[in-house]
Image (cartoon, grey):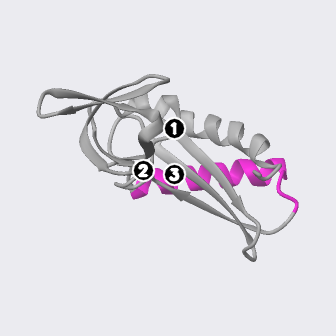
Amino acid sequence: MSHPLIPQISPIAETVAASLGLEVLEVYIYTHKSPAVVRVDIRNLNAHTGLDDCEQMSRALETELDRLELIPHAYVLEISSPGTTRTLVSDREFIAFRGFKVNVTGHTQTWQGQLVNRSPDLLVLSQKGKLLQIPWTEIAKVELV
């Protein structure tokens, strides 16, 4: 179950990110830590996501969250990039990372290739120019290489 503040924080983070040329990939809240942690994963839309992107997002989002007083308790704000290994989940991610090299972990085997397409039934990879169609029923996870 996701935290009830995520639906309120996400659009704020997305607005702040858009003003900086960034995209919010995910918002997490970890209440089992003291103080609680609000983590926002971002991606630069035009270049490699760097420390400067994370720093700018942190300063701008912290200012906005403090101004709105949405979080009623102490928290630590963490801004991070997805890094080199990232599990693809949403339609938007599969579209954004077309042409990128991926590892596909299946229930009985693994595949590696360039992401070509995703449909409701199949994931299509290119392996040295040859198209490989993998049924979703055989796939456990798809990650960027």
Does the segment drawn in magenta span residue 73?
no
Does the segment drawn in magenta span residue 69?
yes
Q: Residue furthest bottom?
A: 34
| Amino acid type, label 1 | Glu
Which of the numbered marks, if any, corresponds to residue 100?
none
Q: Position of residue 139 (x, y in %)?
A: 43, 42
Where disc 2 sits, the SS reads loop
Magenta part of the protein: which range?
51-72
Crowdedness near tag 3: few (<14), some (14–19) or many (≥20) residues, C-alpha within 10 Å: some
Tell me the residue at 77%/67% (across/down). Answer: 31
Whole-number angstrom distance, CA of label 1 to CA of label 3: 13 Å
Residue mark closest to the camera, 1 vs 3: 1
In the figure, 13 relative to 59: above or below?
Answer: above
**Are the residues flagged by discs 1 and 3 in contact, CB closer than 8 Å?**
no
Whole-number angstrom distance, CA of label 2 to CA of label 3: 41 Å
Where disc 3 sits, the SS reads helix
Indicate left or right for 139 with 133 as reference.
Answer: right
| Amino acid type, label 2 | His
Q: Position of residue 89 (x, y in %)?
A: 51, 40
> What is the chief secondary structure element of the magenta stretch?
helix
Q: Position of residue 111 (x, y in %)?
A: 27, 45
Where disc 1 sits, the SS reads strand
Q: Position of residue 50 (x, y in %)?
A: 38, 53
Residue under pointer 1:
23
Residue under pointer 3:
56
Query: Sequence order check: which comes first, mark 2 or mark 3?
Result: 3
Query: Sequence order check: which comes first, mark 1 or mark 3?
Result: 1
Residue mark closest to the camera, 2 vs 3: 2
Residue under pointer 2:
107
